[in-house]
Image (cartoon, rainbow, N blue to C red):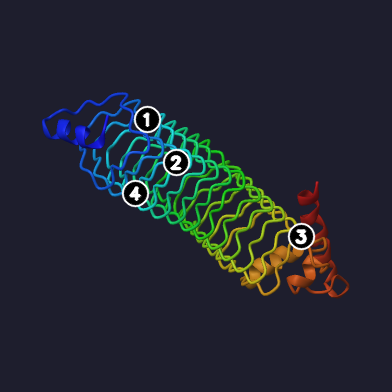
Amino acid sequence: MKVNDLLKLYEAGQRSFVGIDLRGADLSGVTLVGVDLTGANLTGANLSRAFLTKSNLSETFLNWADLSFVKFSEGRLEDADLTKARLNGAFMVKANLSKSKLSGAILGDANLRGANLQRANLCGANLQNINLRNANLARANLNWANLSGARLSGANLLGAFLDGVNFKGAFLNGLDLRGIDLSGVNLSNAKLSGANLEDANLAATNLSAAKLQGVSMNGANLAGADLSSASLSRADLNWANLSQADLTQADLSDVNLLGARIEGAEFTKASLHATTRDYLCLMASGVTWNQKSTRETLNCAVVEDMPAEIHHRSESAASPLTQ
């Protein structure tokens, strides 16, 4: 069917165009509100700036299509193929993209607030500065996706696949990320204030300059993590593993570190209350990544100069943490 024929039928009141073949068609700027294009072939089509609000494009073929700045709020794209599609600047608030294929797609600056992306494949997609507030990303494949600057407050990431994802500068405030595996992920400059990261795996994760005020990391694995210049005031790091972590110039004011492992951790120029520093010195041991002793980076008193009672307390406090 030709584009002109489609538009004439739409003007005449027809809304069902199931299975239509519009490969490579130029539909830029058209108004097709509330249409049913289920199973249509729109491979390589140009739908930029089109008005498709509340339309049904489920199971459509939209790979390599241009949907930049499309208006698609409350629309349906379940199980659609959008591989390598362009959706930058798209307005897709509360759209349903569950099980859709978006690997390698471009969604920079798109608005998908409240959208359903459950089990969607976003592997390697460019989601820079995207708005995903309150979106459902449960079991979504976000491996190697670029989410730098993305807004994810209120989003559901339960069971999402996050290998190699880039969260640099992303907004993750208040998220429930308990037990999540973010090992090796880039979270530098990310905003995570108030998030729940209890028992999360953050080994070798880049959290430099991240905003982590009031975050709960009870029992989290932060071994080898980069927390340099991070803001951790009022954070709960009780029983966390901070061995070999870099906390250079980190803000650790009012932080809770009961039972935390700090073997080989780096604390140079970290902001610590005197009582917290004294507590850490009781258990400090090991050598940091730059061959300094953890005790040296904490400015602890030399063991030989410590009173015998304090020295004894240091040895007994350290032993449970190294077992």
Distance from Cα at disc 4 to Cα at disc 2:
15 Å
* Vertical placement of residue 148 versus 77, above or below: below
Q: Nearer the viewer, mark 4 or mark 2?
A: 2
The percent position of residue 172, horizontal first and vertical second, equals 47, 53
Q: Is the residue under label 4 in contact with that under label 3 (CB below 8 Å)?
A: no
As measured in the structure, the alpha-carbon distance from the residue carrying label 1 to the one carrying label 2 is 12 Å
Q: Amino acid at mark 2?
A: Trp
Q: Quadrant of residue 224?
A: bottom right
> Which residue was labeled with disc 2?
64
Query: On residue 90, which mark appears?
Result: 4
Q: What percent of the width, then of the height, locates residue 41?
A: 37, 30
Q: Residues within 10 Å of mark 2 (few under 14, many from 20)?
A: many
Q: Are marks 1 and 3 in contact (CB under 8 Å)?
A: no
User: Can the viewer see residue 34 in this picture?
Assistant: no
> Which amino acid, by three-letter code, is at mark 1?
Asn
In this view of the protein, which residue sits in the foreground, 168 or 48? 48
Residue pointed to by mark 3? 283
**158 is higher (above) or lower (below) than 213:** above
Whether tag 3 and tag 2 are in contact, CB under 8 A, the answer is no
Q: Residue at 25% x, 40% y: name it.
A: 52
Nearer the camera: disc 1 or disc 3: 1
